[in-house]
Amino acid sequence: MEFKTFVFYVMAAILLFAAVRVITARNPVHAALFLVLSFFSGAGIWLLLEAEFLAITLILVYVGAVMVLFLFVVMMLDIDIERLREGFWSHLPVGGLVGALLAVQMALVLGGSYFGADVMPTPPAAQESYSNTREIGRVLYTDYAYPFELASLILLVAMIAAVTLTLRKRKGLKNVNPSEQVMVHRADRVRMVSMPAEKE
């Protein structure tokens, strides 16, 4: 067995273990930390596939931003774990059925003739001048330019909707009007007082 194949199996095993622990951990903070471990393992697999840009993006965006936000939200909300576990057994049959269907679908796709060695041969080694970032940018802004712009527009609408839904006028809340704030004059805010000098 080659060393690269051995590293892939190790990373894949850690990724599967961490993914299982994400959904089986009793503590939400532990589940979030196992999700961080799965992200790192996925980034390692991306590195084995010579996709360095995707690997560093996975770490910076998901681990550095999204998971930190998850941890802050979990710790700030102080979730009642016992209340969440009350409906576990009632939803277990539906969850098991959905999991079984997902497993059957993955077995049909991965076990068929779609991912065989004859259908997907080993790609040739990249040249020295090959840049993963440049190739992703070229494909993203040429072949997938319109879907990329559409996705950015959807995210912009979602962000505006989130800000609009959370922006409420509450009693006792201090608001600042920027237009009134920049229209002030120094004479309205600062008063010069002439005081005699004091000597000991």
Image (cartoon, rainbow, N blue to C red):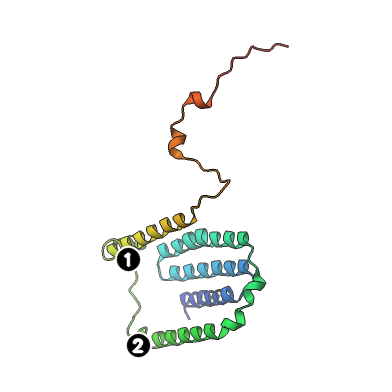
Numbered mark located on residue 24 in the image: none
Q: Residue furthest right?
A: 200
Badge 2: residue crowd in 10 Å (few <14, some 14–19, many ≥20): few
The vertical placement of 12 against 136, above or below, is below
Q: Circle 1 is placed at which residue position? A: 127
The vertical placement of 90 against 34, above or below, is below
Secondary element type, mark 1: loop
Residue 57 place in picture, x, y as percent: 44, 61
Residue 186 place in picture, x, y as percent: 48, 25
Q: Circle 2 is placed at which residue position? A: 113
Of the residues shown, which amino acid type is indicated by label 2?
A: Ser
Task: Work out whether residue 145 or residue 81 is closer to the camera in this orientation and state it.
Answer: 81
Report the quarter where the C terminus lies. top right
- What residue appears at the point 41 percent right and 71 percent down from the top-left corner? 49
Secondary element type, mark 2: loop
The image quadrant that residue 71 belongs to is bottom right
The vertical placement of 10 against 146, above or below, is below
